[in-house]
Amino acid sequence: MTAQSRVSAFTLAPGDSALISTIEKFSFDFDITATIGDKFAMSARGLLILHGAAVHPGYGRTYDSMADRWVPKHDERLYFIVANVGPIDIHLREGDEIAYLQFFDIEPAAQLRSVSNVGFDYLSRLFRADHDTEDGGLAYFRNVKDLRSETESTVRDLQTRIEQSQREMESELAQLKREVSDAQTSVDRVTNASNTVVVFGVFLVGVTLLGFVLTSIADLIDKLPDHMGAGRFAIVVALAVSYGVAAIAGVGFVAKAAWASAGRTPPSRSGR
Protein backbone atom coordinates (compact mmCIF):
# COMPACT_ATOMS: atom_id res chain seq x y z
CA MET A 1 0.00 0.00 0.00
CA THR A 2 1.39 3.36 -0.99
CA ALA A 3 0.39 6.92 -0.29
CA GLN A 4 -1.30 7.09 -3.70
CA SER A 5 -3.53 4.11 -2.79
CA ARG A 6 -4.92 5.71 0.36
CA VAL A 7 -8.61 6.57 0.20
CA SER A 8 -10.89 8.85 2.20
CA ALA A 9 -13.88 6.47 2.20
CA PHE A 10 -14.33 2.73 1.81
CA THR A 11 -16.68 -0.15 2.62
CA LEU A 12 -15.84 -3.25 4.64
CA ALA A 13 -17.88 -6.25 3.60
CA PRO A 14 -18.27 -9.04 6.18
CA GLY A 15 -14.82 -10.62 6.61
CA ASP A 16 -12.91 -7.71 5.04
CA SER A 17 -10.13 -5.85 6.84
CA ALA A 18 -8.21 -2.63 6.31
CA LEU A 19 -5.37 -0.55 7.69
CA ILE A 20 -6.22 3.01 8.76
CA SER A 21 -4.47 5.85 10.57
CA THR A 22 -5.59 8.82 12.62
CA ILE A 23 -6.05 12.22 11.07
CA GLU A 24 -4.28 13.72 14.07
CA LYS A 25 -0.51 13.67 14.42
CA PHE A 26 0.83 12.73 17.86
CA SER A 27 3.89 13.85 19.78
CA PHE A 28 3.83 13.02 23.52
CA ASP A 29 5.96 14.55 26.22
CA PHE A 30 7.67 12.02 28.46
CA ASP A 31 5.35 12.84 31.34
CA ILE A 32 2.17 12.11 29.29
CA THR A 33 0.62 8.76 28.40
CA ALA A 34 -2.77 7.70 27.07
CA THR A 35 -4.95 4.61 26.87
CA ILE A 36 -6.90 3.69 23.71
CA GLY A 37 -10.52 2.55 23.79
CA ASP A 38 -13.01 1.49 21.10
CA LYS A 39 -16.18 3.42 20.39
CA PHE A 40 -19.08 1.17 21.35
CA ALA A 41 -21.23 2.47 18.51
CA MET A 42 -18.73 1.07 16.01
CA SER A 43 -18.24 -2.19 17.89
CA ALA A 44 -22.02 -2.70 17.93
CA ARG A 45 -21.98 -2.61 14.13
CA GLY A 46 -19.40 -5.41 14.05
CA LEU A 47 -16.24 -3.35 13.65
CA LEU A 48 -13.27 -5.01 15.34
CA ILE A 49 -10.36 -2.64 16.00
CA LEU A 50 -6.87 -4.06 16.58
CA HIS A 51 -4.48 -1.68 18.33
CA GLY A 52 -2.15 -1.31 21.29
CA ALA A 53 -3.76 -0.67 24.65
CA ALA A 54 -1.74 2.44 25.49
CA VAL A 55 0.37 5.21 23.96
CA HIS A 56 3.82 5.28 25.51
CA PRO A 57 5.32 8.47 26.91
CA GLY A 58 7.57 10.08 24.33
CA TYR A 59 5.61 8.61 21.42
CA GLY A 60 6.17 10.77 18.37
CA ARG A 61 9.41 12.30 19.68
CA THR A 62 12.92 11.90 18.32
CA TYR A 63 16.23 13.12 19.74
CA ASP A 64 17.96 15.94 17.86
CA SER A 65 21.62 15.59 18.69
CA MET A 66 22.46 18.91 17.04
CA ALA A 67 20.01 20.82 19.24
CA ASP A 68 20.48 18.38 22.16
CA ARG A 69 16.76 18.02 22.75
CA TRP A 70 13.71 15.90 21.94
CA VAL A 71 11.67 17.20 19.01
CA PRO A 72 8.39 16.03 17.36
CA LYS A 73 8.70 13.59 14.50
CA HIS A 74 7.60 14.77 11.08
CA ASP A 75 4.47 12.64 10.59
CA GLU A 76 3.70 10.36 13.52
CA ARG A 77 0.17 8.96 13.76
CA LEU A 78 -1.68 6.11 15.44
CA TYR A 79 -2.45 3.13 13.23
CA PHE A 80 -5.31 0.68 13.52
CA ILE A 81 -6.24 -2.53 11.76
CA VAL A 82 -10.02 -2.78 11.43
CA ALA A 83 -12.05 -5.82 10.41
CA ASN A 84 -15.74 -6.36 9.82
CA VAL A 85 -16.82 -9.33 11.94
CA GLY A 86 -20.53 -8.50 11.61
CA PRO A 87 -23.18 -9.68 9.13
CA ILE A 88 -23.58 -6.44 7.11
CA ASP A 89 -21.36 -3.96 5.26
CA ILE A 90 -19.71 -1.17 7.25
CA HIS A 91 -19.06 2.15 5.54
CA LEU A 92 -16.18 4.24 6.87
CA ARG A 93 -15.24 7.79 5.89
CA GLU A 94 -12.42 10.09 6.78
CA GLY A 95 -13.26 11.79 10.07
CA ASP A 96 -15.41 8.98 11.52
CA GLU A 97 -14.79 8.48 15.23
CA ILE A 98 -13.90 4.85 15.92
CA ALA A 99 -11.74 5.15 19.07
CA TYR A 100 -10.93 7.53 21.90
CA LEU A 101 -7.87 8.40 24.06
CA GLN A 102 -7.66 9.04 27.79
CA PHE A 103 -4.61 11.11 28.76
CA PHE A 104 -2.72 10.78 32.05
CA ASP A 105 0.08 12.71 33.70
CA ILE A 106 2.92 10.47 34.91
CA GLU A 107 6.39 10.81 36.38
CA PRO A 108 8.89 10.77 33.51
CA ALA A 109 11.42 7.97 33.39
CA ALA A 110 14.92 8.59 34.63
CA GLN A 111 16.35 7.69 31.24
CA LEU A 112 14.49 9.01 28.20
CA ARG A 113 14.46 6.95 25.02
CA SER A 114 12.70 6.98 21.68
CA VAL A 115 9.55 4.89 21.25
CA SER A 116 9.85 2.72 18.17
CA ASN A 117 6.83 2.54 15.89
CA VAL A 118 6.62 -0.09 13.16
CA GLY A 119 4.67 2.43 11.10
CA PHE A 120 2.33 2.40 8.18
CA ASP A 121 4.66 0.75 5.69
CA TYR A 122 5.37 -2.17 8.01
CA LEU A 123 1.73 -2.83 8.84
CA SER A 124 0.69 -2.53 5.20
CA ARG A 125 2.60 -5.75 4.47
CA LEU A 126 -0.41 -7.56 5.90
CA PHE A 127 -2.40 -6.25 2.96
CA ARG A 128 0.07 -6.94 0.15
CA ALA A 129 0.44 -10.17 -1.76
CA ASP A 130 3.86 -11.72 -1.33
CA HIS A 131 5.47 -15.16 -1.44
CA ASP A 132 3.73 -16.33 1.72
CA THR A 133 0.17 -15.21 1.03
CA GLU A 134 -2.01 -15.37 -2.05
CA ASP A 135 -3.71 -12.02 -1.48
CA GLY A 136 -3.86 -9.15 0.97
CA GLY A 137 -5.81 -8.76 4.17
CA LEU A 138 -5.74 -10.51 7.51
CA ALA A 139 -5.60 -14.25 6.83
CA TYR A 140 -8.03 -15.30 9.56
CA PHE A 141 -10.89 -13.04 8.47
CA ARG A 142 -10.21 -13.76 4.80
CA ASN A 143 -10.27 -17.51 5.45
CA VAL A 144 -13.50 -17.25 7.45
CA LYS A 145 -15.10 -15.29 4.63
CA ASP A 146 -13.94 -17.82 2.03
CA LEU A 147 -15.10 -20.70 4.20
CA ARG A 148 -18.52 -19.12 4.57
CA SER A 149 -18.79 -18.66 0.79
CA GLU A 150 -17.76 -22.27 0.19
CA THR A 151 -20.21 -23.49 2.83
CA GLU A 152 -23.09 -21.52 1.34
CA SER A 153 -22.21 -22.85 -2.12
CA THR A 154 -22.09 -26.42 -0.79
CA VAL A 155 -25.43 -25.97 0.98
CA ARG A 156 -27.02 -24.62 -2.21
CA ASP A 157 -25.67 -27.56 -4.22
CA LEU A 158 -26.91 -30.00 -1.59
CA GLN A 159 -30.36 -28.42 -1.56
CA THR A 160 -30.48 -28.61 -5.36
CA ARG A 161 -29.54 -32.30 -5.28
CA ILE A 162 -32.11 -33.02 -2.55
CA GLU A 163 -34.85 -31.27 -4.53
CA GLN A 164 -33.86 -33.15 -7.69
CA SER A 165 -33.84 -36.48 -5.83
CA GLN A 166 -37.23 -35.66 -4.32
CA ARG A 167 -38.67 -34.94 -7.77
CA GLU A 168 -37.23 -38.18 -9.12
CA MET A 169 -38.67 -40.14 -6.18
CA GLU A 170 -42.08 -38.54 -6.68
CA SER A 171 -41.96 -39.42 -10.39
CA GLU A 172 -40.98 -43.03 -9.62
CA LEU A 173 -43.70 -43.26 -6.96
CA ALA A 174 -46.31 -41.99 -9.42
CA GLN A 175 -45.13 -44.52 -12.00
CA LEU A 176 -45.30 -47.29 -9.40
CA LYS A 177 -48.83 -46.26 -8.46
CA ARG A 178 -49.87 -46.41 -12.13
CA GLU A 179 -48.32 -49.86 -12.49
CA VAL A 180 -50.07 -51.08 -9.32
CA SER A 181 -53.38 -49.66 -10.60
CA ASP A 182 -52.92 -51.38 -13.97
CA ALA A 183 -52.03 -54.66 -12.25
CA GLN A 184 -55.07 -54.36 -9.97
CA THR A 185 -57.29 -53.74 -13.02
CA SER A 186 -55.88 -56.83 -14.73
CA VAL A 187 -56.45 -58.91 -11.58
CA ASP A 188 -60.02 -57.64 -11.32
CA ARG A 189 -60.70 -58.55 -14.93
CA VAL A 190 -59.27 -62.03 -14.48
CA THR A 191 -61.29 -62.47 -11.30
CA ASN A 192 -64.50 -61.29 -12.96
CA ALA A 193 -63.87 -63.54 -15.96
CA SER A 194 -63.28 -66.54 -13.73
CA ASN A 195 -66.43 -65.72 -11.79
CA THR A 196 -68.36 -65.60 -15.09
CA VAL A 197 -66.98 -68.99 -16.07
CA VAL A 198 -67.98 -70.42 -12.70
CA VAL A 199 -71.47 -68.93 -12.97
CA PHE A 200 -71.85 -70.23 -16.51
CA GLY A 201 -70.67 -73.65 -15.38
CA VAL A 202 -73.19 -73.65 -12.53
CA PHE A 203 -75.85 -72.61 -15.05
CA LEU A 204 -74.95 -75.47 -17.36
CA VAL A 205 -75.02 -77.93 -14.48
CA GLY A 206 -78.41 -76.57 -13.40
CA VAL A 207 -79.80 -76.77 -16.94
CA THR A 208 -78.50 -80.32 -17.29
CA LEU A 209 -80.09 -81.34 -14.00
CA LEU A 210 -83.35 -79.61 -14.96
CA GLY A 211 -83.35 -81.41 -18.30
CA PHE A 212 -82.73 -84.69 -16.54
CA VAL A 213 -85.62 -83.97 -14.18
CA LEU A 214 -87.88 -82.99 -17.06
CA THR A 215 -86.98 -86.18 -18.96
CA SER A 216 -87.71 -88.27 -15.89
CA ILE A 217 -91.06 -86.54 -15.37
CA ALA A 218 -91.91 -86.99 -19.07
CA ASP A 219 -91.25 -90.70 -18.73
CA LEU A 220 -93.56 -90.78 -15.74
CA ILE A 221 -96.23 -88.90 -17.68
CA ASP A 222 -96.03 -91.45 -20.47
CA LYS A 223 -96.79 -94.14 -17.94
CA LEU A 224 -99.94 -92.40 -16.72
CA PRO A 225 -103.29 -93.97 -17.71
CA ASP A 226 -104.82 -92.93 -21.04
CA HIS A 227 -107.98 -91.53 -19.43
CA MET A 228 -105.80 -88.64 -18.01
CA GLY A 229 -105.03 -87.25 -21.47
CA ALA A 230 -106.03 -83.66 -20.71
CA GLY A 231 -104.21 -83.65 -17.42
CA ARG A 232 -101.17 -85.21 -19.03
CA PHE A 233 -101.10 -82.43 -21.61
CA ALA A 234 -101.40 -79.74 -18.96
CA ILE A 235 -98.52 -81.20 -17.01
CA VAL A 236 -96.30 -81.32 -20.11
CA VAL A 237 -97.10 -77.68 -20.94
CA ALA A 238 -96.35 -76.58 -17.38
CA LEU A 239 -93.01 -78.39 -17.41
CA ALA A 240 -92.09 -76.89 -20.77
CA VAL A 241 -92.94 -73.39 -19.59
CA SER A 242 -90.93 -73.89 -16.38
CA TYR A 243 -87.94 -75.11 -18.38
CA GLY A 244 -88.14 -72.11 -20.72
CA VAL A 245 -88.40 -69.59 -17.90
CA ALA A 246 -85.49 -71.18 -16.07
CA ALA A 247 -83.37 -71.19 -19.23
CA ILE A 248 -84.12 -67.51 -20.00
CA ALA A 249 -83.40 -66.46 -16.41
CA GLY A 250 -80.13 -68.38 -16.44
CA VAL A 251 -79.04 -66.77 -19.70
CA GLY A 252 -79.85 -63.31 -18.35
CA PHE A 253 -77.93 -63.98 -15.15
CA VAL A 254 -74.85 -65.16 -17.07
CA ALA A 255 -75.01 -62.14 -19.42
CA LYS A 256 -75.20 -59.75 -16.46
CA ALA A 257 -72.18 -61.40 -14.86
CA ALA A 258 -70.27 -61.14 -18.15
CA TRP A 259 -71.02 -57.41 -18.43
CA ALA A 260 -69.91 -56.88 -14.83
CA SER A 261 -66.63 -58.73 -15.43
CA ALA A 262 -65.90 -56.38 -18.33
CA GLY A 263 -66.43 -53.37 -16.08
CA ARG A 264 -69.52 -52.17 -17.93
CA THR A 265 -73.12 -51.63 -16.93
CA PRO A 266 -75.68 -53.79 -18.79
CA PRO A 267 -78.10 -51.76 -20.97
CA SER A 268 -81.51 -51.06 -19.48
CA ARG A 269 -84.74 -50.65 -21.30
CA SER A 270 -86.33 -47.23 -21.03
CA GLY A 271 -90.00 -47.12 -20.16
CA ARG A 272 -92.48 -45.70 -22.56
Image (cartoon, helix red, strand yellow):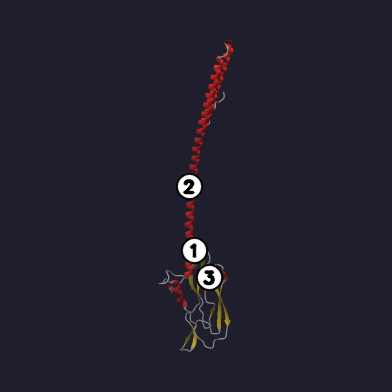
Dot 2: within a 10 Å radius of its alpha carbon, few (fewer than 14), some, or many (20 or more) residues?
Answer: few
Q: Which mark is residue 98?
A: none
User: Dot 1, crowdedness within 10 Å: few (<14), some or many (≥20)?
Assistant: few
Which one is earlier in the sequence, the residue at label 1 or at label 3?
3
Q: Residues within 10 Å of mark 3 (few under 14, many from 20)?
A: some
Image quadrant holding the C terminus, namely top right
Determine if residue 93 is in view: no
Q: CA distance from mark 1 to mark 3?
A: 19 Å
Image coordinates for residue 248, horizontal then vertical, percent:
54, 23
Under tag 2, what secondary structure? helix
Q: Amino acid at mark 1?
A: Arg
SS at badge 1: helix
- In the picture, the quarter occupied by the N terminus is bottom left
The amino acid sitting under disc 3 is: Leu
Residue 106: image location, x then y, percent = 57, 84
Q: Nearer the viewer, residue 184 or 4?
A: 184
Residue at 57% from the left image edge and 71% from the top image edge? 40
Query: Which residue in the protein does label 3 denote?
Result: 48
Q: What residue does disc 2 label?
A: 172
Of residues 1 and 68, the one nearer the viewer is 1
